[in-house]
Amino acid sequence: MRNSELGEAHGKSAPAVPAGVEPAVDRRSLAVMLGGLSLLGPLSIDAYLPAFADIQRDFQASAADLQLTLTGYLLAFACMSLVHGPLSDAFGRRRVILSALLAFAVAALGCTLSPSVGWLTAFRVVQGMSAGVGTVVGRAIIRDCFDGAAATRLLALPAGNFAAACTPPVRLKHPGAAICRGLRQSPLPSCCSCHCT
């Protein structure tokens, strides 16, 4: 291929979804699914931090031991964020997401049943390895399926979902206020509380 042909090929943008092919899910379902996946990592930290004192008391562990559980989680999260993309390119987006969700669920169960702070640290590392998949692979899915303004709007959703989950208390007057009241009564961190009328 000559350089002029190469330049022309890169200058034209192909549609994200080929003509005549229906996407497997609609935009709204995709946004909800990817938004939920992207919240997995941040909320697994935000729901964990307020329980530090209780965990320290239950395991009779030092503050340094408990801080190691968070350090291990964050280190694994950061390192695996570099790996999730290439893994999803090699093995497929769906397979990587489902494997990571399974690993996260098993690690969450392991954290719950941990007999010592050492086991808790190990399971938190596994959670960190799998929690970033929603953000990394979710963005890859958006880039695969959408172009231009549609992609930009969907790429902004995970950040908006997290901001909505952890904003200061807000008064809401809408039919969904009952959900918010239920959340207020649940044991969520203070950053996720809301005041509904």
Image (cartoon, grey):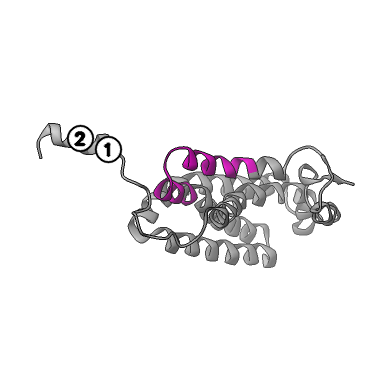
**Rendered image quadrant of residue 87:** bottom left
Query: Mark 1 sits on what residue?
Result: 12
Magenta range = 137-160
Disc 1 crowd rating (10 Å Cα; few below 14, some 14-19, many 20+) is few
Labels 2 & 1 near each other (Cβ < 8 A)? yes
* Residue occupying the point 20% across, 35% down: 8
* Residue occupying the point 54% across, 62% down: 101
Q: Which kind of residue does numbered mark 2 sit on?
A: Glu
Magenta-colored stretch includes residue 150: yes
Query: Mark 2 sits on what residue?
Result: 8
The Cα atoms of the two marked residues, 2 and 1, are separated by 6 Å
* Residue occupying the point 43% across, 64% down: 95
Against 169, residue 101 (above or below) is below
Q: Toward the viewer: 118 or 189? A: 189
Q: Which kind of residue does numbered mark 1 sit on?
A: Lys
Residue sticking out furthest to the left = 2
Looking at the figure, which quarter contains the N terminus?
top left
